[in-house]
Every structure is written in structure tokens, then in C-alpha cells.
Image: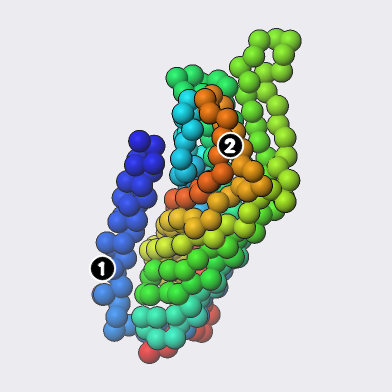
């Protein structure tokens, strides 16, 4: 159920950007375009565990965000190339079924490299997430004097490089000859698992088999300001 709601949210947000962006792009087909743009972007949203959930456990959304730089180079009015580099955080949340505690929050940090193609106002490509660090925050729900919570780091050798298929839309909000302020929306769907080396266990799970498949898709929205001084061409 959680995965279905997350997929519906991703599609709805993508349509909110797609429809006005296509309309605006069609209206601007005959106008001069910017040969290159570069600047900053920041997005925030949600990620969720999208693997097979063990019996006895439940999952939910986890906060996700990316901060970085983005550049695009146009080969023509409708086609070009893009590259983004940033710091990304995503993760997973688990709890025992039917209870709020115990619960477990897994937070993962990456160096995100985002090569892609630009079609008008859309960016299509991949995201390569190189692991920087990971942390587990666990709420035990145990009475005093037992610990109510604890945290531990996840070794980098346990974390996998994440490969995502990435789709982003750039909807212009403010435009001038020197740069554009864009509303930005992106969806990333992983082709790889976030955690390797034997997997992990979730609160409340009734089996003794660890979770070994851990894809974490994300949906994020935000803003990007891209400079383009003197870069217009017919």
C-alpha cells in the first residue's frame, strides 16, 4: 500500500510539471534559446524502501534532499546535454507492525553525479550515488533504565554505489537574458540496492532472513537558478 501511494504521488507531481512545461516549450519554439546554462539547485522531498518488506514490519516515508550545481549545453533548440553534481541524502524508515515503537531510521548520504540529456525543459539520465556515510537511529520503546534509543554508523564498505534512472523537469518562473529561475521536480528510480554485505533486519520482522534488496526511489521538488550571460542563439 505504501509503495502504491508513493508511485501515485510521483506520477501526480511529474504531471504537474510536464503539462505546463510542454505547453510553454511549444510556445517558445520560435524564440532564441540559451546555448548554455549553469548554476545552483536545491530540492527536497521523500524517499521510501521499495523492496520486499518482511512480515511483522511496516515502512514509511523518509525525508530526502539534494543540494548541488547544474549545467546544461544546448546542441539545438530542442536537444542538449546536462550534468549535475551534488550532495544527496535519502533513507528508509521501519517500525513494528501495529506499533509506533520500536522503529528504525536509516539515513544515507551520497555524492550525487547526474549526467543526462536535455529535451527542451526535461532532463533524462542517470544518477550515480557514491556513498559518503550512513547512520541508523533506533528507538527501542524499552522502559527505563534500559536505553530508549541509540544510534550507530554504517560502514562505507557496507554501502553500495546507487544507480538511478532520473527524470527531471525545469519549469521557468523568472526569465531574463542573464539567467532563469526554475521550479524543479525530479523522480529517481534505483536499479541497485543501497545496502549490501548480508543486508539488515527490521523491527518486528518474524523471519530470520535479512533484507538484502533495498532499492530507495525518491521524489523531490525545489528550485534552480541557472546563469546564461550572453548565451542566446537562434
Q: Residue at x 70, y 42 (%)?
A: 154
Q: Residue at x 58, y 50 (%)?
A: 194
Task: Measure the C-alpha gap from mark 2 to mark 1.
Answer: 48 Å
Residue sitting farthest toward the bottom: 234
> Which disc number belongs to residue 210?
2
Q: Position of residue 142 (x, y in %)?
A: 64, 14
Residue closer to the observer: 199 or 98: 199
- For disc 2, the neighbor class at 10 Å (few under 14, some 14 to 19, many from 20) is few
Q: Residue at x 37, y 75 (%)?
A: 120
Quadrant assignment, res 147: top right
The residue carrying mark 1 is 23
Q: Residue at x 63, y 54 (%)?
A: 160
Q: Secondary structure at mark 2?
A: loop
Residue sitting farthest toward the front: 208
> Which disc number belongs to residue 114?
none
Q: Position of residue 4 (x, y in %)?
A: 34, 42
> 87 left or right of 233?
right
Residue closer to the observer: 119 or 213: 213
Determine whether 232 is above or below 217 in the image. below
Determine whether 150 is above or below 92 in the image. above
Q: Position of residue 162 (x, y in %)?
A: 57, 57
Residue depth check, mark 2 versus mark 1: number of the one nearer the observer: 2
For the N terminus, the quadrant is top left
Kindly check if marks 2 and 1 are in contact, taking CB atoms under 8 A apart as contact: no
Amino acid at each position: 500500500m505504501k509503495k502504491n501511494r508513493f508511485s501515485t504521488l510521483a506520477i501526480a507531481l511529474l504531471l504537474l510539471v510536464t503539462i505546463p512545461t510542454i505547453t510553454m516549450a511549444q510556445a517558445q519554439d520560435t524564440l532564441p534559446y540559451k546555448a548554455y546554462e549553469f548554476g545552483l539547485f536545491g530540492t527536497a522531498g521523500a524517499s521510501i524502501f521499495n523492496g520486499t518488506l518482511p512480515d511483522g514490519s511496516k515502512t514509511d516515508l523518509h525525508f530526502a534532499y539534494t543540494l548541488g550545481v547544474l549545467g546544461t549545453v544546448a546542441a539545438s533548440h530542442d536537444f542538449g546535454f546536462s550534468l549535475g553534481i551534488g550532495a544527496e541524502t535519502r533513507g528508509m524508515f521501519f517500525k513494528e507492525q501495529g506499533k509506533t515503537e520500536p522503529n528504525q531510521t536509516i539515513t544515507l548520504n551520497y555524492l550525487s553525479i547526474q549526467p543526462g540529456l536535455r529535451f527542451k525543459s526535461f532532463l533524462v539520465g542517470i544518477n550515480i550515488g557514491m556513498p559518503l556515510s550512513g547512520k541508523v537511529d533506533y528507538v527501542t520503546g524499552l522502559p527505563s533504565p534500559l536505553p530508549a534509543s541509540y544510534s550507530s554508523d554504517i560502514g562505507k564498505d557496507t554501502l553500495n554505489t546507487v544507480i538511478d534512472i532520473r527524470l527531471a523537469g525545469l519549469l521557468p518562473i523568472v526569465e531574463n537574458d542573464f539567467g532563469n529561475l526554475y521550479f524543479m521536480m525530479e523522480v529517481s528510480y534505483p536499479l541497485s540496492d543501497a545496502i549490501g554485505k548480508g543486508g539488515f533486519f527490521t523491527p518486528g520482522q518474524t523471519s530470520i532472513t535479512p533484507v538484502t534488496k533495498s532499492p530507495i526511489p525518491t521524489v523531490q521538488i525545489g528550485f534552480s537558478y541557472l546563469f546564461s550571460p550572453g548565451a542566446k542563439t537562434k
